[in-house]
Image: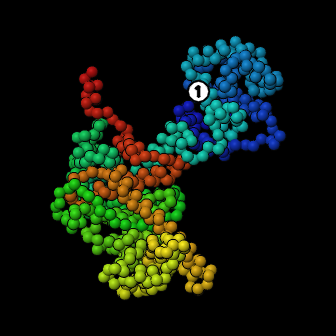
């Protein structure tokens, strides 16, 4: 029996506990069906004696003051958790002479001998016996040796431990968190293009750390060096300049391309990690307020001074992910932005279903959704019966609908659409109600519906429309994406420069994406499933970006003075 380098110390074992559990599950050997508890005890006790000297060595005992037989006995007593020396003397006495010889133990030792031996070891190196015992029990567990139940309970060893990080020591959980965030941060920095012609050798991850700090305290990132709670020189990231200067030099298209590349790479990571279950695409608009003074960016603002933001989001039962974010120059170019985002996304993945919210039911919106004939799409339809929009689709749907039922308007949409689209509707009332309200309806031309009028087909149509209605509820998660990225990961700025505003808004969305990925995708190496908070994630990003927290300049000066 050997002990690998995986078990370098008790601290390292706690860090590597998920790997050890995985090894234990792989190496576990089932004994004979007629094996007794005493058989398991004998196998385990012999294995403890096999690795005793090596475990003392790992625990730091370089020159043991005892012969091997006493070393083994002291370790076995500790691993077994037998506190009374007389009781351990009786425990060893249950083995016959041949077994003790095989184990490398000696029958003649009395309880006083065991007591003196342990004291001599502890005097040589404090705490060496418990640490060596912990290493031995864990190493044998990982090697597949049958572990007695009492020892499993003593050292919290279980073959049933699942991937939830909460099941492991905090050290292992934190290592998994830092490992995953470090991989994601590498992806971000690889595509973070801040004038690389002058910053080719600079560590741009520190810029991400500065933004994480801004999102933590909701203070402008441009004041970072004046308010940071630890030493940090932006010169390590940006040559002879500041964040303000570098962002001011960015054009809007550069910001757009930069974050498209970042989010595409992150999305590839999620897909490769099989982090998506049943993803759908959602396209939505939102207006974001700004504290900046209005300047030449008024074309990108609403009448009440808000930025107009369009975003394509992935909404999945396990994950919301903001793929693309655009600042619009008027809502009329929303369809053109949707086409642009879909073309970019199509390079990386197939889009199974695209959903858009109300106000996206114009002819140009439908045309954008029809960009790829292989994709299904769904547009939330509005009731224009009492308007001059010239669309009576909802009125025709009402004529067909019954309480609690579904209906289809075969030829709907707009006169300039070729071919027509369907309007499928669902009554949220019960079949006993006197009204068909509330109604939810969708434009689509890609959802397969049966052609015949049989009862079976009618039932299938109803189930399909109800499934669409249920699936559409997933689209609401994009609202959460917008809200949390703004409220929990907001990177404050007082600038009214449109490119700078786009950069800051994209950074907020990026932090939200990282937050959702960490809470969804298993950590590399360990496979642990993590649960983190907004505050913890931003702190981890800062620690990784700045190579750990550093003390304030005032404290450093005081220490130097003294």
Q: Is residue 562 left or right of residue 83?
A: left
What colour scheme does the image use?
rainbow
- Asked which quadrant contains residue 116, the reply is top right
Q: Residue at x 23, y 45 (%)?
A: 223
- The vertical placement of 157 against 304, above or below, is above
Q: Residue at x 62, y 82 (%)?
A: 455
Label 1 sits on a secondary structure element that is helix
Q: Is residue 390 left or right of residue 164?
A: left
Tag 1 residue: 131
Residue 15 % position (x, y): 53, 38
Figure quadrant of the N terminus: top right
Residue 59 % position (x, y): 57, 26
Figure quadrant of the C terminus: top left
| Of residues 438 and 376, the one drawn nearer to the viewer in this rendering | 438
- Asked which quadrant contains residue 152, the reply is top right
Q: Is residue 545 left or right of residue 226?
A: right
Q: Is residue 505 left or right of residue 413?
A: left
| Of residues 72 and 152, the one drawn nearer to the viewer in this rendering | 152
Whether residue 557 is visible here, answered yes or no, is yes
Number of dots carrying numbers:
1
Residue 298 % position (x, y): 19, 65
Whether residue 378 is visible here, answered yes or no, is no
Q: Residue at x 33, y 74 (%)?
A: 336
- The vertical placement of 373 against 133, above or below, is below
Q: Residue at x 50, y 71 (%)?
A: 429
Residue 169 % position (x, y): 54, 37
| Of residues 207 and 284, the one drawn nearer to the viewer in this rendering | 284
Q: Residues within 10 Å of mark 1 (few under 14, many from 20)?
A: many
- The vertical placement of 22 against 352, above or below, is above
């Amino acid at each position: 029996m050997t002990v690998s380098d995986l078990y370098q110390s008790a601290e390292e074992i706690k860090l590597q506990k998920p790997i050890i559990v995985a090894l234990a599950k792989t190496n576990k050997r089932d004994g004979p069906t007629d094996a007794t508890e005493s058989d398991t005890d004998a196998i385990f006790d012999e294995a403890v004696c096999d690795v005793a000297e090596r475990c003392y060595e790992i625990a730091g005992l370089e020159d043991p003051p005892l012969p091997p037989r006493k070393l083994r006995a002291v370790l076995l007593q500790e691993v077994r958790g037998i506190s009374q020396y007389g009781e351990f003397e009786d425990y060893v006495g249950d083995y016959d002479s041949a077994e003790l010889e095989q184990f490398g133990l000696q029958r003649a030792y009395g309880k006083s001998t065991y007591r003196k031996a342990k004291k001599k070891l502890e005097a040589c190196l404090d705490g060496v016996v418990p640490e060596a015992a912990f290493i031995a029990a864990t190493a044998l567990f990982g090697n597949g040796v049958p572990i007695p139940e009492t020892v499993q309970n003593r050292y919290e060893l279980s073959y049933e431990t699942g991937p939830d990080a909460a099941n492991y020591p905090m050290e292992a959980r934190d290592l998994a968190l830092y490992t995953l965030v470090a991989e994601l941060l590498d992806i971000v920095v690889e595509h973070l293009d801040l004038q690389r012609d002058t910053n080719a050798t600079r560590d741009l991850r520190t810029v991400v750390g500065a933004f994480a700090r801004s999102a933590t305290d909701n203070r402008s990132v441009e004041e970072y060096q004046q308010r940071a709670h630890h030493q940090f020189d932006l010169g390590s990231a940006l040559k002879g300049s500041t964040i303000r200067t570098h962002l001011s030099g960015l054009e809007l298209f550069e910001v757009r391309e930069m974050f498209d590349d970042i989010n595409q790479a992150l999305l590839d990571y999620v897909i490769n990690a099989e982090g998506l279950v049943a993803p759908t695409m959602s396209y939505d608009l939102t207006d974001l307020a700004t504290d900046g003074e209005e300047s030449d960016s008024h074309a990108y603002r609403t009448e009440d001074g808000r930025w107009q933001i369009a975003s394509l989001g992935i909404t999945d039962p396990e994950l919301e992910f903001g793929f693309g974010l655009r600042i619009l120059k008027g809502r009329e170019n929303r369809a053109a932005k949707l086409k642009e985002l879909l073309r970019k996304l199509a390079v990386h993945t197939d889009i199974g279903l695209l959903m858009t919210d109300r106000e996206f039911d114009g002819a140009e919106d439908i045309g954008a959704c029809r960009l790829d004939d292989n994709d299904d799409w769904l547009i939330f339809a509005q009731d224009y019966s009492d308007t001059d929009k010239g669309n009576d689709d909802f009125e025709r749907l009402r004529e067909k609908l019954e309480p609690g039922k579904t209906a289809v308007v075969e030829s709907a949409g707009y006169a300039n659409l070729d071919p027509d689209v369907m309007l499928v509707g669902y009554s949220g009332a019960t079949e006993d109600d006197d009204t068909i309200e509330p109604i939810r309806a969708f434009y689509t031309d890609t959802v397969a519906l049966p052609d015949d009028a049989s009862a079976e087909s009618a039932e299938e149509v109803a189930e399909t429309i109800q499934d669409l209605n249920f699936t559409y509820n997933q689209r609401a998660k994009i609202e959460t994406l917008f809200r949390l990225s703004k409220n929990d990961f907001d990177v404050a700025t007082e600038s009214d420069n449109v490119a700078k505003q786009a950069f800051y808004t994209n950074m907020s969305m990026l932090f939200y994406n990282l937050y959702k990925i960490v809470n969804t995708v298993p950590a590399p190496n360990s496979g642990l499933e993590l649960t983190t908070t907004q505050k913890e994630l931003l702190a981890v990003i800062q620690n990784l970006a700045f190579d750990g927290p550093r003390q304030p300049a005032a404290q450093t000066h005081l220490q130097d003075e003294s």
